[in-house]
Image (tube, rainbow, N blue to C red):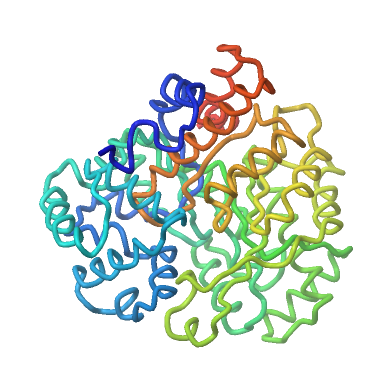
Amino acid sequence: MKPFIHNNFILESPTAEKLYHDFAGQLPIIDFHCHLNAKDIAEDRSFDNLSQVWLEGDHYKWRAMRINGVNEKYCTGSVSDKDKFLKWAETVPNTLNNPLYHWTHLELARYFNITDLLSPATAETIFNRTQEMLKSPEFSTRNLMRKMKVEMVGTTDDPADSLEYHLQLKNEGFDIQVLPTFRADNVLKTEDATTFIAYMEKLGTAADVSIHTYHDLLKALDQRHAFFHEVGGRLSDSGPDRFYYADYTDAEIAVIFKKLMNGQIIDAEETEKYRTSIMADLSRMNHQRGWTQQFHVGALRNNNTRKYNTLGADTGFDSIGNPQDSVKMSRFLDLLDSTDQLSKTILYNLNPSDNEMMLTMCGNFNDGSIAGKVQHGAAWWFLDQKTGMEKHLRDLSALGLIRHFVGMVTDSRSLLSYPRHEYFRRIACNLIGHEVEKGLIPNDEQLLKTLIEGISYYNAKSYFKF
């Protein structure tokens, strides 16, 4: 019987098979947005078992396990790695038609050459078999990345991070680029005065700047931005719930920041002005140094207060937020463009109802200077599944130019997530293949080769110039 993960998995037509196998399948991976730990890469971490490499920090799996009725101790608790794995194996058969089912079996096949379905019946054998394999040097962090033909990784890093592990990798000449991404979300978090002031102290220490005024804050951020640039960083990222916009003056921002540093609570109007200002100033730094900026908007985070208080953020209690305010998004981007300081920009939405709006918004700010200068990023988080990616690719084709799309990212904390690039490539080839067979796209080999190879690899390589 043919295994579930086979040579033509997801490929439903001869054209789709040709597009994937001839053009997409063997290309390297540029994973320009993820949440991998640079320390693990620098130290070439080895893993004792599949649970360590698969379940640590993976809130996608934890969320599914909780929905399946699994006790929290098997997700984030102190039970043994094997017990956690067995509970994940118990959950997997219940994830049918969820992307986790596909990802799980792609990862078993690609990293371990295991094509058995994971279930309680096979769990013990798979755990033991992979445990033996993980003892081999070829399963160390760096070698797993090499196995997947990873060429570049963009981690996600706070401005106050020392980047010591990025520097270590750079200095030793590691053959895969591991570059930091500047994510300054903590300067937006004004809700808790004590936390905000503590972060200002941390940032100031990292930049060797005593932060008392808004001007001091910009000086500290600019120094850290320059340091990231020196290490090799060429991207920023921001993850607010939405775009902010309010007219403001420098004098107003100075007063608002002084209030924050005095431990005072600022009102909604002041918050809108401050966040508009700081996001705009960070964006101007990106333009000054020729960076690409990314905005991931639309997540409603930390919904479960009880779990947040015991487990913290990024543990699987986030959801899709409200549709974006298109007027505020437009005015924020226009604020930068009006002074010709809008850098290359990638916009990601979490609410699928924002797809068309965001795609047409991108078109407003492409000025002909760079192909795809402002573009719609890959289907993200809850949209990072077959239906979501197909919708994204169809919308992108209808309202933008799919030819210049920079492609897939893992957006993952798991080292075993690289087959998500294969998943995307197969889905894209299948979608385009169907259009070719219906006569809606010419069956022209050069046209198709350029498109498929571009969205799989070459567009990102050209756009970012890593």
Q: 373 or 26: which is nearer to us?
A: 26
3 lies left or right of 431:
left
> Residue 90's quadrant in the figure?
bottom left
Q: Which residue corresponds to the image point at 70% horizontal and 79% vertical from the top-left?
A: 260
Depicted 375 relative to depicted 53: above or below: above
> Residue 2's quadrant in the figure?
top left
| Labels in figure, total | 0
> Residue 298's quadrant in the figure?
bottom right
395 lies left or right of 407:
right
Q: 94 or 425: which is nearer to us?
A: 94
Give the x, y percent position of residue 273. 81, 68
Q: Which residue corresponds to the image point at 28% horizontal and 41% vertical from the top-left?
A: 3
Depicted 195 relative to depicted 358: above or below: below
Depicted 157 relative to depicted 154: above or below: below
Give the x, y percent position of residue 285. 67, 48
Give the x, y percent position of residue 312. 46, 78
Q: 400 or 15: which is nearer to us?
A: 15
Give the x, y percent position of residue 385. 52, 50
Q: Which residue corresponds to the image point at 66% horizontal and 73% vertical from the top-left?
A: 212
Image quadrant occupied by the N terminus: top left
Tell which residue pokes out farthest to the front in this image: 1
